[in-house]
Image (cartoon, rainbow, N blue to C red):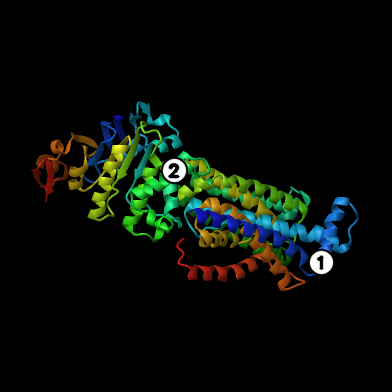
Amino acid sequence: MILAENLSYSINDKSLIKDISLVLHPKKINLIIGPNGAGKSTLLKILTGQLQSNTGKVLYDDKSINSFSTNELAQKRALLSQSIELSFAFTVKEIVLMGRYPHFKHSPTKVDFEIVDYCMEMFGIQGFAERNFLSLSGGEKQRVQFARVIAQIISEDKESERLLALDEPLNALDIFYQLDFMDELRSIIKRENIVVVGVLHDLNLVAKYADQIIVLNQGELISIGSPSEVLTVDLIKKVYAVKMNVHVENERIHLLI
Amino acid sequence: MKAKRNKSRIIFLCLLVLTLLIIVVSARYGALKLDLNTIFSAIEKYFLNEKMSLNERIFFNLRLPRSLLCVFVGMALAVGGTLLQGLFRNPIIEPGLIGTSSGAALGAALYFVLGVYFKFNAGEWTLPIVACVGGLLATGVVFLISGTKSTGKNSTIELLLVGIAVNALCLSGVGFLSYIARDPQARSITFWSMGSLSGANWIAVFTVGIVTSFMVLLALRYAKHLNSFVMGEEEAYLMGINVQKVKLFILLINIIMVSVATAFVGVISFVGLIVPHLLRILNGSDNRYLIPCSALLGGFLLAAADLVARLAVSPAELPIGIVTSIIGVPIFILLLKRNSYKY
């Protein structure tokens, strides 16, 4: 379980996050929504340790995030962001192997290579393992990054709790891969003790895949709960200033502009 | 991946053989051709402590230290280039770009023009010391100016921009000194700015050799860290790298290596730029392969360039910097054009 207690963050007297407390459970997908500038990315960065909150604390399994070294933290959490560009040519397999960097000192072990192969298979990229990453299409690149990030937090100790953060990772992808990714994610958290927390813009994807939705507006926590509790006409109007129709069909929510 | 690692090993071994070969070849040829027997008997007489003939002394006191110095200087420059290109995520970077080599050039120019007024005198060590201090000072200034905002995404770019500015400043200082210099002094500045190995001796070989070998071994420990910089510093942090610490270490390794090498032989351009590229074309950008191989290829190329510099207008010599550029640039452009190589 990952706990965030009374997080606040401000920069130059501008408050980006105001007193936010959250409980995030393993094997659940927690998605943060809100308009641009609501503080979604800031919150995500505080949860991953990239930013230090001014007040409050983040606890991974009852231990403060600050008690881990950079390397220990990297074994426990990974972040997938939207598009990562490389400055030099590396092969797909080399990139996925980078996910194992926090786990070995100088040379990868046999286990590291096994995990790399396992993750490449998971995302169907073993066919171009030896290809130059820079020559891939946007969708292929993102699948490689997905495999790298999963390789980073796969642990032999299935009980240990880990965090996977998603920062709009589906933006460059077509609808097939968007759904494919989210389905893959669901099946991964069935096997691994991973907390997923992420920012997605597409509210329909959020409605379909979130176990818990966190709604932010102007740095404040507006609402938190399951899709059916949170995604209402009133809330969307209040937060996004947009009128949307919400249809509920067989307990599934559909949003229409 | 296994195939790729094997290829790395083969390239490394080939380069090792080539480097050892060039040491012998470049020691044999010059204004005077030495035969192998002279070489063997010189080595034998050294260990037996016997008096050497003239040719044997040419080999032992001039040729051998010179080719060894070439190899070590080439190593320092090429590994420096690999480290800085990786760190700055930028393929057009030379190891001297953060002020190191232009600062050393300014120090050397000061020595040539105003050396007689220096209170400080260390005999034949004066020039290397002054140049080394110049390089370190200029780099220090770059750090001081850019270091104020030492965290965040832009710090690396800022370091680079300040480096380019300080470089320009140092070079205009060198220009000014050449302008006010008398003719022979101005010639010394020019020669030094294009690099010269004619002053090679065993002291230089040991100093540059020990510093460079030690720094290259240290750099190897950071190969993995440097790889993770390829996706940016933010991603490197997320992969468990202590970004600020690693950055500082890599920069220090580079600065120490390059300023010591430059101090003894002057400014030699292009080796640090071209070697990492050639190796990336051959077998990718993994720094665990690039660092050791660039040490060897840098050493080989500089020794080969020095051989050409000595033979081309024998018995006179060309400045080695001219040779590295004349040979290096066309090869470089050819390779870039021929390969579907994306840096």
Residue B88 percent across, percent down from the top left: 48, 52
Q: Mark on residue A110? A: none
Q: Is residue B101 above or below residue B304?
A: above
* Res B201 seen here: yes
For mark 1, give the secondary structure. Answer: loop
Kindly identify the residue that appears in the image at 31 percent across and 39 percent down: A44
- The crowding category of the residue bearing disc 2, from other C-alpha atoms within 10 Å (few below 14, some 14 to 19, many at least 20), is many
Circles 1 and 2 in contact, beta carbons < 8 Å: no
Residue A59 percent across, percent down from the top left: 34, 29
Q: Disc 2 is attached to a residue of which chain?
A: A
Q: Disc 1 is attached to a residue of which chain?
A: B
Q: Mark on residue A100? A: 2
Residue A48 percent across, percent down from the top left: 35, 38
For mark 2, give the secondary structure. Answer: loop
- The crowding category of the residue bearing disc 1, from other C-alpha atoms within 10 Å (few below 14, some 14 to 19, many at least 20), is few
Of residues A103 and B49, the one drawn nearer to the viewer in this rendering: A103
Q: Is residue B208 above or below residue A32?
A: below
- Same-chain status of marks 1 and 2: no
Q: Residue furthest right?
A: B51
Tally of marks: 2
Q: From mark 1 to mark 2, how far is it between C-alphas?
A: 54 Å
Of residues B77 and A105, the one drawn nearer to the viewer in this rendering: A105
Of residues B261 and B115, the one drawn nearer to the viewer in this rendering: B261
Mark 1 residue type: Asp
Mark 2 residue type: Arg
* Res B153 seen here: no
Kindly identify the residue that appears in the image at 13 percent across and 38 percent down: A228
Residue B209 percent across, percent down from the top left: 69, 50
Residue pointed to by mark 1: B35
Of residues B169 and B294, the one drawn nearer to the viewer in this rendering: B294
Q: Is residue A189 above or below residue B193?
A: above
